[in-house]
Structure formats: C-alpha cells, structure tokens
Image: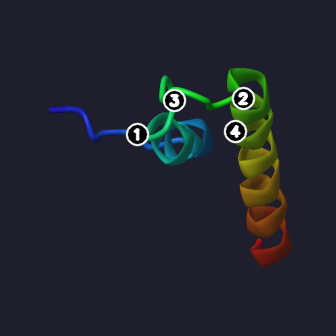
Amino acid sequence: MQNPTITLEVIADVVTGSISGVNGVNQELLDNLNHVLVGLMQTMGAAQG
C-alpha cells in the first residue's frame, strides 16, 4: 500500500479549484493565484526549514 502524497500544487489546486469554472471568474487570474500560492507555501517552508 502506497502512502498518498500531497504536494503544494495539490493544496493550491484545492483552494483555487473550488471556484474554477464559476461564471465571472477570470481563469487567467485564478491560474496566477494558484502559482502565487505555491510560491508562498514554498517560501514559508524554506523559512521554517
């Protein structure tokens, strides 16, 4: 049995995916937010490590 792997990308996808496809949402900006969230979490992890 394999242990599930949760990546920073998966976490960001869960956050932004909840509103993806909603009328009026700018998908390009949502994709940028996803990228920024991953970068922020990477920075926070590096600061703790």
Mark 4 residue crowding within 10 angstroms, few (<14) / some (14–19) / many (20+): many
Residue 40's disc number: none
Q: Name the residue type under label 1.
A: Thr
Mark 2 = which residue? 31
Mark 3 = which residue? 20
Residue sitting nearer the eye, 35 or 46:
35
Mark 2 residue crowding within 10 angstroms, few (<14) / some (14–19) / many (20+): some
Mark 1 = which residue? 5
Of callouts 4 and 3, the N-terminal one:
3
Mark 3 residue crowding within 10 angstroms, few (<14) / some (14–19) / many (20+): some
Of callouts 4 and 1, the N-terminal one:
1
Spatial separation of the CA atoms under disc 4 and disc 1: 19 Å
Spatial separation of the CA atoms under disc 1 and disc 3: 23 Å
Q: Nearer the viewer, mark 3 or mark 2?
A: 3
Q: Position of residue 37 (x, y in %)?
A: 73, 50
Mark 4 = which residue? 34
Q: Name the residue type under label 3.
A: Ser
Taking the spot 56% from the left edge, 41% from the top edge, the residue there is: 16
Mark 1 residue crowding within 10 angstroms, few (<14) / some (14–19) / many (20+): few
Q: Name the residue type under label 2.
A: Asp
Spatial separation of the CA atoms under disc 4 and disc 3: 11 Å
Residue that sits furthest to the front in the current view: 24
Task: Give the vertical position of 42 relative to 22 (above or below).
Answer: below
Q: Position of residue 22 (x, y in %)?
A: 48, 29
Taking the spot 77% from the left edge, 71% from the top edge, the residue there is: 49
Q: Position of residue 21 (x, y in %)?
A: 49, 23
Residues at marks 4 and 3 touching, judged by CB atoms closer than 8 Å: no
Where disc 4 sits, the SS reads helix
Taking 1 as reference, is 3 left or right? right
Of callouts 3 and 2, the N-terminal one:
3
